[in-house]
Amino acid sequence: MAAIIHGGMPMNKGNLAIIMSAVVTGAFGIDGAAVAQNASEPIFETVIVTAQKLEQNIYDVPAAISAFSPQTIERQGITDLTDIGKFVPNLNVTGFSAGQTSSVNPFIRGIGLQDHLITTEPGVGVYVDGVYLGRQVGQNWSLANIERVEVLRGPQGTLYGRNSIGGAINIITRKPGDETGGKISLTAGSRDRLNGDAYVNMRLTDQFAMSLSLAYQHRDGLGDFVNIEDPAKRVGELQDISGRVAMKWTPTDQLSFLLTADGDDGDNGLRPYHTLIDELGASCRATAANPATCPNGAVYNAGYRNSDTASNHYDNNTGQVDQIEVTNKAYGVSLTVDYTVSEALNFKLLASDRHSEYESGLDDDSFFDNFLSFPEIGHADQQSAELQVTGKSGALDYVFGLFYYEEEGQNFQNNTAFNCGTKAAPCTAPNGGDFFLHQKYDSKAVYANVGYHFTDAFRIAAGVRQTHDDKSADTAPVVGVISASNSNDGSETTWDVSASYKFADRMTLYGTVQSGYQAGQYPARPFCLFGNPNCFVATDNVTAINYEVGLKGEPLDNLQVSIAVFNTEYTDLPYQVSTTAGAGFSTDSIVVDQTSRGAEFEGTWAVTDNFRLYATVGYLDANVHDPNPAAVAPLTPEWTASLSPELRFAAGSGEVTLRADYSFRDKMFGEPSNDPGRFTQIDSRDLINFDFSYRPGAGDWTVGVYGRNVTDERYDNARLNTGDYVLVMLSNDASEFGVRFSKDF
């Protein structure tokens, strides 16, 4: 099961949450006050996490953290990190990068990644078995073969370092030799859903073990490319193949070597989107009184209207055959060497080499003529190495480490079209030229974190990290016409202090102050060079400091809760803002200060032996301090919530599990600029899943039926007002119903 998570009652959505609970409770005659568990037996499993690079009970971690087990992932219909984002307070996961269906953009407490180009940096770090994934486009990580997913909220600047100013997501896989056997799973459903995955874990000798996992995913699209003859893909179509092999050699009880290799290959249809033209229209022209309003307006002035785009927003009227199919690939190897001298001293070395690439792009105009189109390819290579020294001795525990990370990548757009012709006289060939962007990034760090138990109940800890970054970048907004290069280096010290007190051996109260850091960023699409030859420079480093108080544990035998209240101050935070004014599609950074404050609740109530309620609620007030009063925190809902009732009962010799999951994300803005027409506002969304399964008492298989987004809620992932048109990136998350089967062996 997951630890202290799942479910919640959002503002203005309470009736639906209450009805869900009442329906399940009433239908099966459950007395909400009755709890039949034997008080001498623990109701909740002990959840061990490695969020602070030491094995700890989740209650002992002085930070807001959620954890998901494989069983919870399966029952909640979670297939990727986007689904994880539906059930964690103040976490919103979206995807929109260049029309890619594989992109994952997590926002935690108002901090995330608005763009995907190589010069932009994520604000939430994603790690697999301790290895940092620098880029999320082209890495559609499968959640098969997962031991646990941990979500840490708030800056993690000491133990995780760069690009974790919003938080960190840890994916921990099962290790070879920890168990033997395996599992196969099959899923079939509507929209031509067909998934299959297999996992096997083998101990070949006393010293050598290996595991192997393979996964295949396919789902049909939501619409058609109506102007393309025999298109290779439908809009939003998904097809992905992934695999992972891990080998572990343990020559002695103290020493082990773990070698892993993984790969992923996706061949998908362009994400659904549409373009708003008339909403800006002729009335949205620059005037002497208001020169900042819609400075370009080329699409409308060229004679195009909303009627030129598809009437069904999930269809697409593009005429560009080369932009209907998107691909992503990733592969990597890693080596972990673990040497245990004693409980007081352990050495661990993690080294990795990874590559990711994608091919995508958007025909921004959404109509047949090639007026605005930006086909794109990108890739990134990264190498990392980390040495950790950990241990416990009496009342003392500690983590020391050295970290090195190197990344090099580029983005290239070939044969772009920019404001090309008019509806009466459309262009016969692209006119925008080629766009190129390249960056190289080296990061080195040394860190330490030490904790001390003054008593069994009272612990304090402190940590510090020194980071040195070297970053260089070069660009050619129009290849052969103009170019620029720049380099930037700097150092930053981050730190944290925390205190925790466990009382009645049931509850832990903690307080923590954490700082975070992220290196400055270069403009993503620097067409500003045409008017300002010196504009290709990095912003100042981002710094963050978070003050947090939390309470977690089991106040009652049948109740598990986690509560956190926080205030985070961000300085020199870059927001990406795009416009079509000038020589091309330009994306620059506006630098703001931001205060994110709020509260989070997660709880599990074991109402009876057979009935549980999981709930989460998050509230976030993200206040942007900027001379431009219209600036807002993008893709950041004020309220997030979920509610998940789960009922189990005997059926013959087996057990039936009935589960529903409700998730709410409040309205938000799709970009930092709160435009006067509110064209970038995204409506709130309510999503409901269900899963009914049966497992025989002595059996090794499970069969179930599921529904995802059962009300077929269609919602936006992002919105972008360029001053010329509004680009609306749509969710690929329509309703789906099916059956699933799994067998252990």
Image (tube, helix red, strand yellow):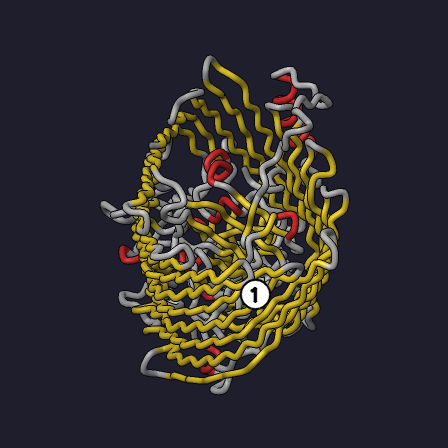
Which residue lies under the disc numbered 1?
399
The residue at 32%/82% (across/down) is: 480
Q: Is residue 399 left or right of residue 351?
A: right
Q: Which quadrant of the figure has residue 79?
A: top left
Q: Is residue 703 above or below residue 485?
A: above
Residue 23 location, x and y as percent? 63, 22
Q: Which quadrant of the figure has residue 294?
A: bottom right
- Total labels: the figure holds 1
Residue 321 location, x and y as percent? 27, 55
Instruction: Residue at the far top: name it.
Output: 652
Q: Is residue 66 left or right of residue 40?
A: left
The residue at 73%/49% (across/down) is: 502
Q: Is residue 21 above or below residue 575?
A: above
Q: Which quadrant of the figure has residue 664?
A: top right
Residue 221 location, x and y as percent? 36, 41
Residue 202 location, x and y as percent? 31, 43
Q: Quadrant of the N terminus?
A: top right
The residue at 47%/49% (across/down) is: 81
The residue at 54%/65% (across/down) is: 160
Q: Is residue 239 left or right of residue 618?
A: left
